[in-house]
Amino acid sequence: MNIATWNVNSLKIRFNQVLDFLVKNNIDILCLQETKLIDDNFPHEEFNRLGYQSYCYGQKTYNGVAIISKYKAIEVSYGIKNYIDEQKRVISITVNVNNFDLRIICIYCPNGQSLESDKFRYKMEWFYHLNTFIYNELENHKNLILLGDYNIAPSDDDVYDTNIWQNTILVSKDERTAFTNLINLGLNDLFNKFDQPKKSFTWWDYRNYSFLKNNGLRIDHILASNSVQSVCESFNIDIEMRKKERPSDHAPVSIRIKTI
DNA sequence: ATGTCATTGCATCAATGA
């Protein structure tokens, strides 16, 4: 079973690339971020035609998340439970595959802009509520995967230049603590389960030929509970999609898990 | 490297967010 996450930076613009990615990689479940589509405009029929169900939680202009799945969801939930947030950043589904209940949570974490900004305070508040939410989700779902754009590079290995990326947004101590706090709930960063090339990144700024120079950050992550980690067979960052014409600034990240 | 890209509103570009 192949499960992926991708910040597409507008599903409208990236639609054909998404279809291509799904088919070429035989993706079973894809989590999307920054769809930038209201739910009325979501292309459910087109995904249907390829054999996928789709679940969306979007808004105009900004944010927006969705899950595309070959398996029909037995449960769908929107947002972070008990946290009122106008920004559409979280959607979760449960699927049942061969009597294996799998909880998939797709997240688009706030960027935070700069450490002094109101947006940073919102980011920290948001992660606090996400943590409580995931704690509760883990109580109810043993097999859980949390995928998406975290807007946090967890360690200095996850940035191309530690001189530039030091005590700034995406790498600050507080943000890294928020990431560690999620791990401490009983999750594993599946990137670390396998040997990875040095300088593996998932996002490159559109500016300054960043991708050409591999000036990137690893901010898109797949975290999984122990039971899911134990059946995970591979982890891949698909940088080919970042090489396409008119690409997203993020590359898709995917895993393969043994279906029980 | 604040030298790109996507969206919106009312415009044939500026403002905003990432």
Image (cartoon, rainbow, N blue to C red):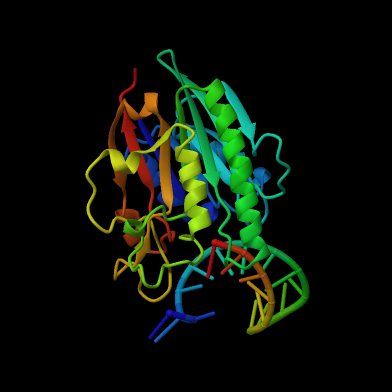
Q: Is residue A213 above or below residue A105?
A: below
Quadrant in which the N terminus of chain A is drawn: top left
- Residue A202, quarter of picture: bottom left
Q: Nearer the viewer, residue A191 or A121?
A: A121
Counting from the top left corner in percent of width and height, residue A61 is at: 64, 58
**View extreme (top): residue:** A99
Q: Looking at the image, which residue is at 67% across and 54% down?
A: A60
- Residue A24 visible in rendering: no
Counting from the top left corner in percent of width and height, residue A201 is at: 34, 56
- Residue A155, quarter of picture: bottom left
- Residue A236 visible in rendering: yes
Counting from the top left corner in percent of width and height, residue A102 is at: 46, 24
Q: Nearer the viewer, residue A79 or A50?
A: A79
Q: Is residue A171 above or below residue A88?
A: below
Q: Is residue A132 above or below residue A140?
A: below
Counting from the top left corner in percent of width and height, residue A258 is at: 30, 24
Q: Nearer the viewer, residue A9 or A77?
A: A77
